[in-house]
Image: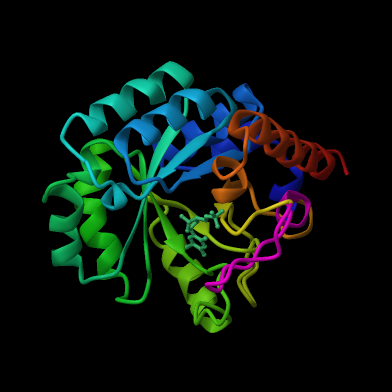
């Protein structure tokens, strides 16, 4: 793909979703393709992580429903830190229901995800209605959606033709869908021209091969250089370390150097 050799900001012109454009630009401005997976269960820890690691990341990925002490001050506090440190918030909600239901899940309930999270994601398993439903809520708010094209976990069913069909669904919804959660840049078999999307990739560690529950890790170089993905998502490799800030700086450098190598090749 020609896009893998271009800079993030040079690619922004090919995106119609405003969140996708914003993300590409801020990555080059901040010189980071690192996202932190902030899987902690207390709001104090969550906000501390966003404040301490904010300067080094492009995306702060949350699982808001694992907080044991969630209250309605959390979204506002996260948004303030996103502005302070210039990162985007990504609630990793993994919607998976029919369009009508996900609309309510995205807009309503306790969390009101659409009101504060720049990015969210969805499984393509229900078919295109899931994108339509989320779009009706998210597009007026200038939000962006990622589709789950592949997963990092052992035995995932998201592969092959499933991933190919996910790519085709994204191509039909470029106003809202600006990329994928995936393990490699996808190319549509038989398609004449390649279209650009952002690829955000979890399952990244420089220390571990995996965990005891099926997680499989690869290095920043494998993800960015070999698989031509764009953002490394790191959780326990950073927040599980004795010095998370020092680790974030290491991962940021590894991800960024791989990107520089890729674009200068
Ligand atoms: N996550 C994955 N793999 C996937 C998808 C999401 O690990 O394929 I889609 C999430 C789960 C967790 C984070 O929030 O990314 C990875 O955390 P660790 O770096 O701690 O394994």
Magenta region, residue range: 207-224
Toward which corner of the image does residue 115 lie, by quadrant? top left
User: Magenta span has 217?
Assistant: yes
Comparing 10 with 138, the one in front is: 138
User: Magenta span has 53?
Assistant: no
Which residue is at a point 48% across and 76% down the rendered structure image?
165
What is the x, y in percent for residue 102?
20, 62
Comparing 130 with 215, the one in front is: 215
Toward which corner of the image does residue 172 lie, by quadrant? bottom left
Above or below, 85 relative to 19: above
Q: Is residue 71 left or right of residue 132?
A: left
Predominant secondary structure, magenta span: loop
Above or below, 123 relative to 103: below
Comparing 55 with 164, the one in front is: 55
Q: Is residue 33 visible?
A: yes
Which residue is at a point 65% across and 61% down the rendered structure image?
185
User: Residue lying farthest right?
Assistant: 265
Q: Is residue 125 left or right of residue 3?
A: left
Task: Please give the count of numbered marks on the rendered protein.
Answer: 0
Which residue is at a point 24% across and 26% down the rendered structure image?
76
Q: Quadrant of the N terminus?
A: bottom right
User: Residue lying farthest front?
Assistant: 242
């Amino acid at each position: 793909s020609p896009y893998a050799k271009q800079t993030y900001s040079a690619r922004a012109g090919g995106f119609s979703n405003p969140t996708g454009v914003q993300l590409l630009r801020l990555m080059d401005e901040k010189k980071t393709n690192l996202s932190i997976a902030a899987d902690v269960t207390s709001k104090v820890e969550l906000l501390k992580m966003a404040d301490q690691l904010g300067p080094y990341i492009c995306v702060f990925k949350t699982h808001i429903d694992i907080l044991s002490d969630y209250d309605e001050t959390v979204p506002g506090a996260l948004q303030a830190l996103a502005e302070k440190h210039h990162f985007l918030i990504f609630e990793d909600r993994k919607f998976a229901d029919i369009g009508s239901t996900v609309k309510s899940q995205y807009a309503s309930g306790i969390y009101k995800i659409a009101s504060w999270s720049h990015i969210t994601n969805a499984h393509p398993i229900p078919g295109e209605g899931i994108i339509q439903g989320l779009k009706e809520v998210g597009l007026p708010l200038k939000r962006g959606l990622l589709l789950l094209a592949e997963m990092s976990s052992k035995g995932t069913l998201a592969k092959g033709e499933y991933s190919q069909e996910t790519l085709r669904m994204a191509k039909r919804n470029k106003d809202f869908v600006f990329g994928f959660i995936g393990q490699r840049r996808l190319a549509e078999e038989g398609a004449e021209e390649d279209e650009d999307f952002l690829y955000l990739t979890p399952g990244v560690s420089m220390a571990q091969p995996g965990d005891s529950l099926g997680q499989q890790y690869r290095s920043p170089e494998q993800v960015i250089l070999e698989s031509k993905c764009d953002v490394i998502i790191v959780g326990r490799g950073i927040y599980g370390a004795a010095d998370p800030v020092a680790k974030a700086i290491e991962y940021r450098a590894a991800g960024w150097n791989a990107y520089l190598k890729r674009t200068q090749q």
